[in-house]
Image (tube, rainbow, N blue to C red):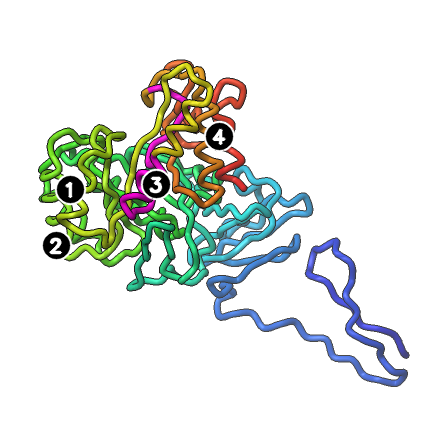
């Protein structure tokens, strides 16, 4: 006989791929690819076609369906069941005792097997088999911006969050896959160690920078900063920021930065303006500690009546930073006149800060991740603590959604 040999993955509805013609009189031997020992798929094995079965370390099976959802078959059973909620799955990957999924937008989720046999999916930092972010290299800073540990230009854009909000927000990267910095609003007087550690581990693995700062504004709690140095000093994706919106004197900032450096910190340090907006002591601090490792972290809100006022403030702050020889990172900006109550020109300011960031003039972290607990729905990225529901774009801050998704 004569003919052709074609193939496609088992259970797939994809087109057949032709291997070649078979001459008349030939013998044909068909063999299946060898299965790994115990049937377990190697870590990192991926499936993009429906019907391809992956087997995790607990011998549970996983597969994509023709409608791009996920099914699983618990070891010892013979029935396929829906693996929790999933939709538009582009890729399924086996990793140790579970599976990961990804969509076409680059989001990643890991599966958790519940005691009742159901599957829950949680936001994951990325492909579990991807190369670990480089450790040992550091970010380089100049008045013109940042160069990352990989040698590429890095343009910061992200959110603020408390350690608890950051831990609860399991869907943040699902909603905002392109945010690359989180300003972590800590309180050095509270025991937040576990949540800080969990946030740093999860975010920097993506990699996403975590800017750790004392949001309670404790001016001289230097021991807390030195403890952060000891824990995170070897992770290039952790930055430190001086206390939030400080009062006090330039000497408080000088002593804080010196304490951080003396503990061995080599990563970037954000210098807060007095009260969040006043540059008056910045030059004194720079004269005492130098510019190495420093960048400026002003906050910007608007409460005036001039429709051009917010743009004037943005331009003035960026120029102030340039005159100091430091990069400008707006570590708080939002649609509230004070980070709390909505301002009539608030959305305009948000759009203007985003435009400046996209033009490479500054970095920007929106205030805040939150869960819509501000009056009038302002200054909140999400309606829910887990980040599963975005703020209503009619009443909320719509500009940040395409900005952190694009």
Quadrant in which residue 26 is drawn: bottom right
Tell whether position 257 is magenta: no
Name the residue carrying label 2: 263
Q: Would residue 341 appear left or right of 263 to someone viewing this image?
A: right
From the image, state whether disc 2 or disc 1 is nearer to you.
Answer: 1
- Quarter occupied by the N terminus: bottom right
Mark with earlier residue (3, 1): 1
Q: Please determine whether, in this image, residue 382 is positioned above or below residue 337.
A: below
Name the residue carrying label 1: 284
Mark with earlier residue (4, 3): 3
Name the residue carrying label 4: 351
From the image, state whether disc 2 or disc 4 is nearer to you.
Answer: 4
Mark with earlier residue (1, 4): 1
Mark with earlier residue (2, 4): 2
The furthest residue to the front = 323
Residue drawn 46% across the image and 19% down it: 307
Spatial separation of the CA atoms under disc 2 and disc 4: 39 Å
Quadrant in which residue 323 is drawn: top left
Q: Are marks 2 and 1 in contact (CB under 8 Å)?
A: no
Name the residue carrying label 3: 329
In-front residue for pair 157/197: 157
Tell whether position 335 is magenta: yes
Q: Would residue 119 appear left or right of 3 to someone viewing this image?
A: left
Residue drawn 15% across the image and 29% down it: 247
Residue drawn 78% across the image and 58% down it: 15
From the image, state whether disc 2 or disc 3 is nearer to you.
Answer: 3
Image coordinates of residue 183 in percent, x first then y, are: 31, 39
Q: Could you tell me which secondary element the residue under label 4 belongs to? A: helix
């Amino acid at each position: 006989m004569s003919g052709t040999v074609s193939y496609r993955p088992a259970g797939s509805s994809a087109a057949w791929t032709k291997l070649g013609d078979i001459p008349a009189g030939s013998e044909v031997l068909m063999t299946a690819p060898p299965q790994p020992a115990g049937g377990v798929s190697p870590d990192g094995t991926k499936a993009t076609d429906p019907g391809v079965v992956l087997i995790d370390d607990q011998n549970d099976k996983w597969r994509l369906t023709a409608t791009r959802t996920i099914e699983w078959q618990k070891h010892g059973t013979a029935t396929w069941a829906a693996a929790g909620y999933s939709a538009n799955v582009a890729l399924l990957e086996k990793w140790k005792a579970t599976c990961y999924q990804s969509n076409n937008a680059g989001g990643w989720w890991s599966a958790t097997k519940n005691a009742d046999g159901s599957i829950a999916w949680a936001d994951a930092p990325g492909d579990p088999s991807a190369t670990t972010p480089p450790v040992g290299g550091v970010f380089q800073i100049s008045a013109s911006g940042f160069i990352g540990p990989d040698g590429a230009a890095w343009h910061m854009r992200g959110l603020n969050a408390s350690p608890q909000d950051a831990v609860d927000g399991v869907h943040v990267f699902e909603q905002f896959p392109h945010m690359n910095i989180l300003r972590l609003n800590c309180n050095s007087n509270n025991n937040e160690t576990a949540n800080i550690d969990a946030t740093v581990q999860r975010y920097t693995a993506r990699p996403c920078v975590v800017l750790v700062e004392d949001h309670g504004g404790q001016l001289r709690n230097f021991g807390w900063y030195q403890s952060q140095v000891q824990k995170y000093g070897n992770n290039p994706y952790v930055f430190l920021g001086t206390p939030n919106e400080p009062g006090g004197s330039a000497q408080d900032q000088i002593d804080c930065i010196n304490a951080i450096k003396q503990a061995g910190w080599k990563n970037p340090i954000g210098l807060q303006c007095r009260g969040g907006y006043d540059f008056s002591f910045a030059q004194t601090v720079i004269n005492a500690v130098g510019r190495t490792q420093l960048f400026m972290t002003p906050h910007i809100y608007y409460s005036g009546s001039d429709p051009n006022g917010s743009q004037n403030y943005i331009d003035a702050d960026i120029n102030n930073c340039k005159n100091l020889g430091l990069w400008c990172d707006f570590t708080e900006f939002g649609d509230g006149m004070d980070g709390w109550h909505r301002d009539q020109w608030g959305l305009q300011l948000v759009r203007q800060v985003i435009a400046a960031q996209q033009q490479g003039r500054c970095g920007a972290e929106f205030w805040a991740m939150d869960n819509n607990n501000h009056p009038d729905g302002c200054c909140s990225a999400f309606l829910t603590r887990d980040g599963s529901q975005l703020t209503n774009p009619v009443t909320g801050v719509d500009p940040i959604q395409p900005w952190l998704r694009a």
